[in-house]
Image (tube, rainbow, N blue to C red):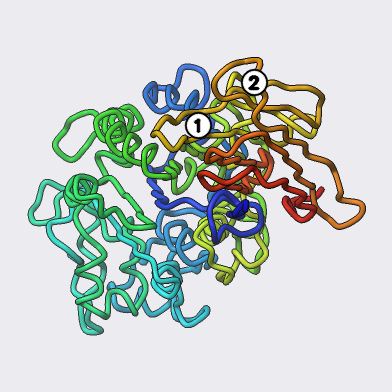
Amino acid sequence: MFMPGGRPAAAAGGLEGVPRFSHIVLLVLENESFATTWGSGSPATYLNGLRAQGVLADHYYATSHHSLGNYVAMVSGQPVRPATASDCAALNLYDCVQGQTAMAGGRNLADQVEDAGLGWKGYMDGMPGPCFHADYSAAAPPPDPYQGDSTAPPAFNYADRHNPFLYFADVIGDDSRCQAHVVPYSSLAADLAGDTLPAFSFITPDTCHDGHDNPCADGSPGGLARADLWLSQNVPALLAYLRSHDGLLLITFDEASAADTSGCCTGGPRGGPGTGGRVGLLALSAAIRAGSVVSTPYDHASLLRTIEDSLGIAEHLNNAATAAPMADLLLPPACVPGAASLCLADGRFAVTAAYATASGQSGAAQAVPLTSDTGYFWFFSAGNVEAVVKILDGCALDDSYWFFAGGLTDVQVTLTVTDTRSGFVKTYTNPQATAFQPIQDTGALPVCP
């Protein structure tokens, strides 16, 4: 008897059409407008070279100026406040942190991820040790001394304001939690090698490597070209890991240049448009439509909602509650007819088959299309039809596409149906040494329209 299985949005738990990824990594650079980074003549040659492997959101906006308000927004959905708009320049770290408790009690993405039973880390380039930060006491003199762009130990180019998790009292105020989760960037290599990368990671290069400083504190060239060099040295290993471990890498900028106050969407004060400028965002994964561009307007609140959705978190914090998820950025690759794949229902669904015999022979079945809705598979010779499949549009009747299959075999057969719009996947397996059982599944694909 056929045993069906399914996974919505590419894996169990994805919401609102956003696919589930086992690992999401957000890497944030500094202070560049869209035209400078992504336009012709950009010094970011490595970053632009990655576009062929990913999807560019070319109308993605920051939510405010300066840095801190954007970093806080990305992990909490909170809009900029007067204090964060100035990077808390007149406050000590303790007083700056307390301001975030005014919205949702300071609840943040780290809390959400842990509540979902998942792991998270912030990997901070240049951080001297786990949970390193300025004096977190009410009596500490302002301002926070660790702002990067420095040749002075111990922090050098590490900046607290680019480390968003420090600005939530339940992280910085819980030293054991902070030590376990907010760590130097140098820890990433061991986590990749040990296959312990968490479900969500936030990477911040130091202020020389993220393009903020130009020149860098030691007098060497900085800016976007220096950030691009750092990416070229650090992204390949990370990207290779993510491609083989169901991962997603998101690269963006905290804000545009100060002169760019454009914005969109819901990430600004009172849920209106922000003013942080157009920066763009590049999504990289083996499971999305490489080489494409999406022009839907999005911002940091959209980013947070997308991460929440992908991790199966139905709660949407603060301005993310009214944001649109970036589902069109993460569509699976379009169906391409091939020797082992049928594209049915006018190309919307990809259908593949795999077989295994009792003697140990196995492989991918060969596909032969018949009509826009129907095709068949053969295993051992082209003239020997083994399984016929059909997909029909039943949306008007029961809000689902219907899947039918029949076969002339008793070997183990696994049929996989993928919706290329939503990423929904359904599988059917006929056990070994069992006559092929007909499939008439009129609730197979609940992905209408």
Which of the 4 quarters of the picture holds residue 407? top right
Question: Where is residue 244 drawn, in percent x and y?
Answer: 36, 38
Question: Where is residue 361 drawn, in percent x and y?
Answer: 42, 30
Which of the 4 quarters of the picture holds residue 235? top left
Residue located at (64% from left, 42% from top): 436
Q: Is residue 36 visible?
A: no
Question: Where is residue 105 drawn, in percent x and y?
Answer: 47, 82
Question: Where is residue 312 drawn, in percent x and y?
Answer: 53, 63
Residue located at (80% from left, 53% from top): 442
Q: Is residue 181 above or below residue 201?
A: below
Q: Is residue 319 visible?
A: yes
Q: Secondary structure at mark 1?
A: strand
Tell me, for residue 149, which label it has, or none.
Answer: none
| Residue type (three-letter) at the residue carrying disc 1 | Gly
Mark 1 = which residue?
A: 54
Disc 2 or 1, which lies upstream in sequence?
Answer: 1
Q: Secondary structure at mark 2?
A: loop
- Count of marks overlaid on the render: 2
Tell me, for residue 384, which label it has, or none.
Answer: 2
Q: Is residue 45 above or below residue 275?
A: above
| Residue type (three-letter) at the residue carrying disc 2 | Asn
Q: CA distance from mark 2 to mark 1?
A: 40 Å
Which sits in the foreground, 362 or 146?
Answer: 362
Residue located at (59% from left, 54% from top): 3
- Asked if residue 241 lies left or right of residue 335, the reply is left
Q: Is residue 180 above or below residue 128?
A: below
